[in-house]
Amino acid sequence: MASRGKFSGRIGFIAAAAGSAVGLGNIWRFPYETGENGGAAFLLIYLICMVLIGFPVMVGEISIGRNTQLNAFGAYKKIGGAKWGLLGYWGIISAIMFLSVYNVIAGWAFAYFIQMTNGVLINTDNFDAHFTSQISDVTDLFFYSLGFMVLTAVIVSRGVKKGIESASRILMPALFIMLIGLILYSFTLDNAMEGIKFYLIPDLSKVTLSTIYNALGQAFFSLSLGMAALVTFGSYISKKENIVTSAALVTVTDTTVAFLAGLLIFPLVFSQGLSPSAGPGLVFVVLPGIFASLGVLGPIIGAVFFLLLCFAALTSTISLLEIPVSYLVDEKGYSRKKVVIFTATLVFIIGIPSMLSYGAVDYFTNFTFYEGKVKNVLDVVFDIFSDVGLPLGGFLMTIFIATKWKKANFNDELEEGNPGYNGSLIQKYLNFSLSYFAPIFLGLMFVVTVLKKFFEIDIF
Ligand code: TRP
């Protein structure tokens, strides 16, 4: 078997896992979800979901990976037999599909970074129209998405430690510094306070069941849960590491970056008197307009912001690519380089219809109709592999621990590298969450999503 590679230690794992978690989900998706779902109230529910469900599920996934020291498929099969191996396959397929669309959006961010540096974006007078034409421009889409995929492949081909870990160790601190710098600047703008109030003072009357539902979905997306990503990552850590502390640090880092992204974006949005509920276009339509209005500093701030978005996306695309790569290296014994070239090409090709689904090709743009609206290919892939797939994957993982692996074995795995864990309060808490909270909420979420999306039965 080809050598699997290993993280250099605790910091290496945390940098890489936090790099996986921190991504477009934090900087692009979290602010618009928060903006659309009532601001501070959403933030509060989101934090609760992180603690009650996100963190325990993360510990579950990592411990399965570390126990078996195998890729997603190998890990589930080793403990649970061939049938459970299918859950690992599902994770690998989800990662491939998810990456194929994620890379398209990363390509948009890349294009916006370049256009901020060369002046194209700042000199636009209609940012909405620019965004619409940008995401339907075939040449640009091709160039930027391909560029992003090539960069991802180069890093992953260097291996777990030299590629993924070192990239994350540089990109993650850089991301933090840029984010803090931008926030300090945004606080100096007129009306910034309005944004901060919207973001930090909760109006609990705005909490509905759909707030909870959206917050849990966001938590799963953001922590990279439900597609065995952390099973794969967990397989590269040693028995000496403390899984609970590591998972806690990853959760805290991820939540902090999302929190900071909100702290940057809402003051900006309110300083211009704009609406925070612009949806997925928030970062691509509203922000460039704001940067353009900031005078000479505008292009610099804008470029830093989109570079930040690219860094965040890159640490996620490399982790996503690692999931199928790890499977092919482990199970088939092919060399890492060959596997990376093959997988990256495959993912890119699979992503082409999604790439062309914002106006470039009519068939992909008006692909189908459900949930009361026209859906393009990218929507369909995200609906299946993110909105429906992630809670399903998380739910089945909890069932796997309870029925197949058994709680005692799970606890013993966590005891390794963390003596005294058995019998501790945190052990009771994690067991409780993984036996009750997580399966109940995730199972419900799966059912509600399927009914809502594909049968037009809206429970809330
Ligand atoms: N967490 C990533 C983000 O916030 C997206 C993501 C979901 C992911 N699942 C993943 C990244 C698996 C890497 C691996 O953008």
Image (spheres, helix red, strand yellow):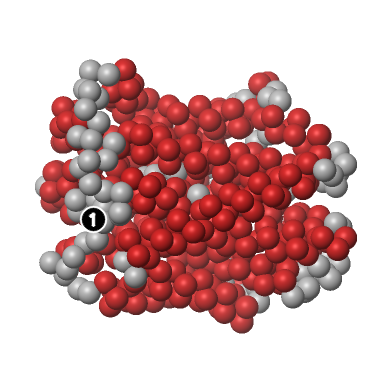
- Give me the residue at 44% from left, 69% from top: 152
User: Which image quadrant is residue 121 in?
Assistant: bottom right
User: Which image quadrant is residue 292 in?
Assistant: bottom right
- Give me the residue at 36% from left, 51% from top: 12
What residue would you read off at disc 1? 71
In the displayed structure, does residue 11 sit left or right of residue 182?
A: left
Please count the marks in the image. 1
The answer to whether 213 is drawn above or below residue 456 in the figure is above
Is residue 44 visible to the viewer in this orientation of the structure? Answer: yes
| Quadrant of image for the C terminus | top right
- Give me the residue at 29% from left, 36% from top: 242
Residue 104: % across, % down: 54, 66
Residue 27: % across, % down: 60, 50
The answer to whether 369 is drawn above or below residue 57 in the figure is below
In the displayed structure, does residue 425 sit left or right of residue 110?
A: left
- Give me the residue at 57% from left, 74% from top: 144
In the displayed structure, does residue 352 sit left or right of residue 179?
A: left
Mark 1: C-beta under 8 Å from nearest atom of ligand 1 = no
Residue 456: % across, % down: 52, 42
**Amino acid type, mark 1:** Asn
Q: Residues within 10 Å of mark 1 (few under 14, many from 20)?
A: many
User: Which image quadrant is residue 250 in?
Assistant: top left
Is residue 88 visible to the viewer in this orientation of the structure? Answer: no
Residue 449: % across, % down: 47, 40
